[in-house]
Image: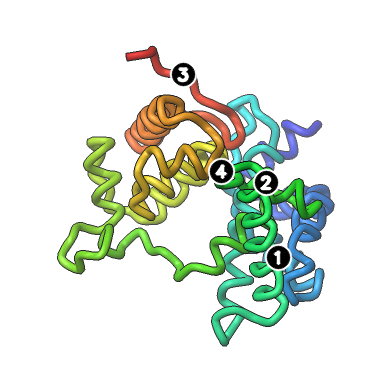
Amino acid sequence: MERSLWERARRGDRQAREELVARNLPLVRHVARRFTGFGHDLDDLVQAGTVGLLQAIDGFDPARGYQFSTYAVPVILGEIRRFLRENDPVGMGRALRARVARVRHAAASLEQRLGRRATAAEVAAELGWDVAEVTFALESAQAPLSLDEPAGDDPDAPPRLDRVAAETGVDWHDVIAVRAALARLPERLRAIVALRFFQDRTQAEVAAAVGLSQPQVSRLERAALEELRRVLSGGEGVAAGEEPARPSAP
């Protein structure tokens, strides 16, 4: 029954698509509730998340064998984060500034107690928040990064997108395809790629940020780039939330 519904929706059956939306709206509400402390009504967050749900329904292929929620949650999160950024006309609203301050205070307190920089998961546990809330607060405290902006401080440097393209050997002209490929990576691999190539962090800095060793970051970085290479060259790739096979040790 479920598979038949997806097949009908993929053939353009509007009623089937609407039924899939209705069935998955509770998932959108569950994700949206994580962000109710950022100064927006839950209904507005759900509306933004529903845009992501529609994108996920259109892009999901049940033949690949993973659950729809695994594919949909990163897409829904992305649209809610976009809504929050685009609907804060002064750059960072009072509620968001307060949450950023709490994250920074908790991170500083943990660093003092642990003798090292705290990971996002540790800060989330300290505050009783979801990791996504901590990550968004930290992202919002920085200027948004664009895939088309130069990497690093040199305005003549190639765009971040080109830098990742050079590492994967894939000629990326379609920014939408790139964003879709990045969205398919598991959360940890996306974070490593973002920190390494979009924020110009060293592997040691990334290791401290995500709570892994530098050799582990090195292996996962190679795995992430290989996975992006497969997805963008037409391979199936992994579902969001799954880890690709680990590369052999050097």
Residue 76: give x, y in percent of width and height. Answer: 65, 54
Residue 142: give x, y in percent of width and height. Answer: 49, 68
Q: Is residue 85 above or below residue 60?
A: below
Q: Amino acid at mark 3?
A: Arg
Between disc 2 and disc 1, the foreground one is 2
Residue at screen point 68% across, 44% down: 122
Real-space Cα distance between discs 4 and 2?
8 Å
Q: Is residue 205 above or below residue 95?
A: above
Q: Amino acid at mark 4?
A: Arg
Residue at screen point 68% across, 55% down: 109
Q: Quadrant of residue 135?
A: bottom right
Of the numbered discs 1 and 3, the one sitting upstream in the chain is 1
Q: Secondary structure at mark 3?
A: loop
Between disc 3 and disc 2, the foreground one is 2
Question: Depth check: 149 or 99 in front?
Answer: 99
- Write down the residue under mark 4: 116
- Write down the residue under mark 1: 102
Q: Residue furthest left?
A: 156
Q: Secondary structure at mark 2?
A: helix
Real-space Cα distance between discs 4 and 1?
18 Å
| Mark 2 nearby-residue class (10 Å; few <14, some 14–19, many ≥20) | few
- Write down the residue under mark 2: 113
| Mark 3 nearby-residue class (10 Å; few <14, some 14–19, many ≥20) | few
Between disc 4 and disc 1, the foreground one is 4
Residue at screen point 64% across, 32% down: 62
Of the numbered discs 4 and 1, the one sitting upstream in the chain is 1
Q: Amino acid at mark 2?
A: Arg
| Tally of numbered tags | 4
Residue 43: give x, y in percent of width and height. Answer: 81, 71
- Write down the residue under mark 3: 246
Please report contact status of discs 4 and 1: CB closer than 8 Å, yes or no: no
